[in-house]
Amino acid sequence: MTNIEVIQELYRAFAAKDYAAFTRLSAPDLAWVQNEGFPGGATHHGPQAVIDGVFRAFDDVWESFSFDTERVLDAGDTVIVIGAYKGRNRETGKAFRSATAHVYELKGGKLVRYRQFADTKVIWDAMG
């Protein structure tokens, strides 16, 4: 599987909540770095910490939350994905769209580091 295919499979796994696939595609020492200003933003270490602290935590706050891919850039062991989050807050019912870039670093076909860059203001506005 190419690095681009690994990332495409990661997005499929996110959307399907296929946590077993996410774990298979991730290195055990995965570092998942979210914007400091992102709701619940933190650095998570290991696939299970990402599953619990990011993906499952979103279900409590968001009625819907997804990512639309606009462009994928292949930089060898780094893959950059440009797109936008969109969602609807469970409590307020407000929707948002946030410009976003994801930077993935891979080694030996496994995700070792993720870094997020997102417009967090529109997300916070939807929450409040």
Image (spheres, rainbow, N blue to C red):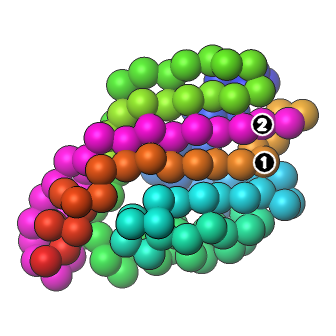
Tell me the kind of residue under disc 1: Val
Q: Please provide the residue range marked out in magenta.
A: 86-107
In the image, taking residue 114 as reference, residue 98 lies left or right, namely left
Where does the image place residue 10, in percent across and percent down from the top left? 61, 43
Secondary structure category for the residue under label 2: strand
Where does the image place residue 109, in percent across and percent down from the top left? 83, 34
In the image, taking residue 57 as reference, residue 64 lies left or right, namely left
Q: Is residue 62 above or below residue 12?
A: below
Determine the CA span between mark 2 and mark 1.
Answer: 5 Å
Q: Residue at x 30, y 58 (%)?
A: 120
Q: Choose between 40 and 8: the one closer to the eye.
A: 40
Q: Choose between 68 and 36: the one closer to the eye.
A: 36
Q: Is residue 127 above or below residue 98?
A: below
Give the quadrant of the C terminus: bottom left
Give the quadrant of the N terminus: top right
**Residue carrying label 2:** 106
Note whether residue 13 is visible: no
In the image, taking residue 19 as reference, residue 61 lies left or right, namely left
Residue 112's disc is 1
Where does the image place residue 95, in percent across and percent down from the top left? 13, 59
Where does the image place residue 8, in percent across and percent down from the top left? 58, 32
Labelled pair 2, 1 in contact (Cβ < 8 Å): yes
Q: Residue at x 37, y 71 (%)?
A: 39
